[in-house]
Amino acid sequence: MRSIFKTGAAALAATTMLAGAAHADAHAALSGTLRIVSDMSNPGPRATMEMLAAEFDEMHPDLEVDLTIVDREAWKTQIRNVLSADPPDVVNWYAANRMGPYVNAGLFMDITDWWDAGDYAGLESVRGALTQDGRQWGVPYTYYQWGVYYREDIFNELGLSEPATWEEELANCQVIVDSGRACYTIGTRFLWTAGGWFDYLNMRTNGFDFHMELARGEVPWTDDRVRQTFANWRQLIDMGGFIADHQNYSWQEALPFMINGEATAYLMGNFAVDQLRNGGLTDDQLDFYQFPIITEGLPQGEDAPTDTFHVASGAQNVEAARAFLAYVTSPEVQTRINGPDNLGQLPVNANSSVADDEFLQQGFAMLSQNAQGGIAQFFDRDWPAEMASIGMEGLQEFMVFPDNLDDILERLEAARQRIY
Amino acid sequence: MSSSTTPALPMHEIRAEATWLQRNKMIVTPLLFLLPGMLFFAVYVIFPIFQSFGISLYRWDGLGEATYIGLANYEELLTDRNFEISLVNNVKWLVLYLLAIPLGLFIALFLNQTVVGIRLYKSLFFFPFVLSQVVVGLVFSWFYLPREGLLNTIIMGLGFDSLNILGDPTLATYGIIAAGLWPQTAYCMILYLTGLNAVDPEQVEAGRLDGAKGWKMLWYVILPQLKPATFIAFVVTIIGALRSFDLISIMTNGGPFGSTRVLSFYMFERALSEFGFRMGYGSAIAVVLFLIMLVFIGYFLWQMWRDERDARRG
């Protein structure tokens, strides 16, 4: 613990040096209380957050860090009240459009100056996700790739290889279905998992730029290109590619289908790996591939949701909050908190190193080399909140009753015209 | 006070000197006792009702500035299909939930006998009402599970196709109502059991002498005496049906694709949930729900007022 703490302090000192000497003085004299409300409530992330708070507390003798951890799902509805009633100094949230309501309401502090001052060296590539109206409203602390996690052993048994194109994908799936399995497990009870499928199918069918135009409400949902996305999706649905009754399951409840071998793959974020391993799958049985190409020649876009820290505009201890954000995003801390013992995800700082993990390495390589189209956040973060909730409901309905497509698209289009 | 310092004064003069407070204490004392309750009721119930009416005329995300938009939220409700689904579901709940009353009566009549261990049977029947709605919801959603659930094991054992009740938009609401009926029936049962204790044995005896038995005895002798219990059972069941929120949230979360929403759940989704930023629209839904409730509340109050008036006359 002590040695970790020392290296942590050293790394912080290094970044503050970079940030400017004038600023370093302020760090030494931090005092009072730093109030943090975090949504990192799952066991692993919780330990990481508690470690961060404890270390930061130790580094600043006169400063007391007061950490409150709120259940991750509950936080999504509580953040409004917390920010407007009794704002803490630092809170967790999500990047991109998800920030919108709080930025517009003036509840997140504009920290563009801190970005400009060089507090966050190595984070240039992710600055865009924290930008709204040309200003920055927070810092990222972790992100993760999405993609297809599959049962390598079943693929080997059936003589399949990772598909690179849609034709190969469909051919693979036919073999899997013929063997009495489903190609994909999915649990759409809480809707967002269907959003992941739409993201990928639409980015691969029509490209990242079109996907973002749709997210910004610039293209009607009844557009033929959108219909093409759904037509591709329907090919998989009609051949029995997805498990039955997925509308009953949460994403965790859909995991056993893959663990038991009733389904061979899962389009998911990297956080699923931990659960699959806990479920008894070894790394020999599990592997990962990038979502296959559908339209030739389109640069691939990828989903890589980013989780963030923000300073409340009502923060009492702004100096300490600033130091904490710099600390969390520094290369050494980034390497450590995203390592396999902690979050097991990708560090946001370019100067950090990615953990020696099969999936993180593949994901990192994919995002840095093979995502020229662009990086999207996720359906429920790129679309405005209301459109996202109506949209995902439609996507779930489509997966169960593909014949309702016209009705669904007209409903989404009506919502688009009202919301934007 | 004057009475203690001037004890020599005659009685009637003391009375004349009594303060306003002393003279009116028969009115003031109950008012003082009522005051805290009335204050809380006004602040937490009456005031929010009017506030909801107010907010429903605005477009407001709950954070920033509110814009006055008149009745636009209500106009949107008229064309909102999800609102229509929620309203229809509310009606289904209201009608089917009332089944709890005859079911409860039947079980109560069945249990209203003296055999060994009847207390144990009564408490077993009452048991579901003690359970939290969340537990009831979870138990039923496992019961309904499409492959592993007990229900499907039974119907597949009988040679029928498996049913995915909570995943089928046409069946899901009925599945949830059935789950809700379980504790609600127990509640009505306990109301009727207490009611049955108060049934006058002399009247039963007299009925029997006149040759009444079976259904006639139940209909003409027992049920009229159970009227107070029936009224309370009706009240709690209607209220229970209108506030059906937790079961829906636990069992289907409003899905599949919004087919099991009721007004209260839809209001929560639009105004307060993860993606809900429409306080005005949510308030408009709440106002509609309130108006529906008002019909019943009005009836209940009128009924109670009438009963009390009759009681005073009698």
Image: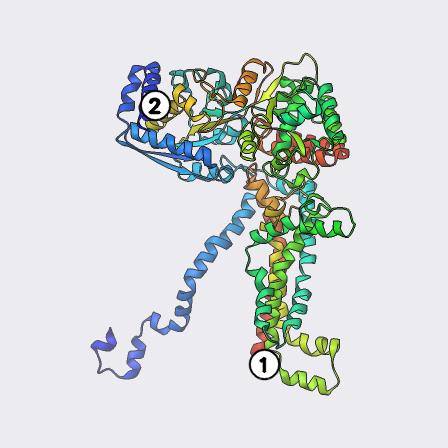
A7 displayed left or right of B231: left
Amino acid under disc 1: Gly
Please give the name of the residue rendered at 75% of the width and 49% of the height, measured from the top-left corner: B156
Indicate the amino acid at tag 2.
Gly
Neighbour tally class for label 2: few under 14, some 14-19, many 20 plus, Cα within 10 Å = many
Q: Give the residue furthest to the bottom.
A: B209
Asked whether the beta carbons under mark 2 and mark 1 sit within 8 Å of each other, the answer is no
Chain of the residue displaying label 1: B
Question: Which of the 4 quarters of the picture holds residue B59?
Answer: top right
Residue A10 percent across, percent down from the top left: 32, 20
Q: Position of residue A166 (x, y in %)?
A: 71, 20
Looking at the image, residue B101 sits to the left or right of residue B211; the answer is: left
Viewer-proximal residue among A81 and A37: A37
| Mark 2, residue position | A8
Q: Is residue B57 visible?
A: no
Name the secondary structure under disc 1: loop
Compared to residue B92, the image places residue A200 above or below, namely above
* Secondary structure of residue under mark 2: helix
Spot the residue most to the front: A157
Q: Which residue is mark 1?
A: B314
Quarter of image, res B104: bottom right
Quadrant where the image shows the C terminus of chain A: top right
In x, y percent, where is residue B200? 62, 82
Image point (61%, 18%), residue name: A301
Residue B295 left/right relative to A116: right
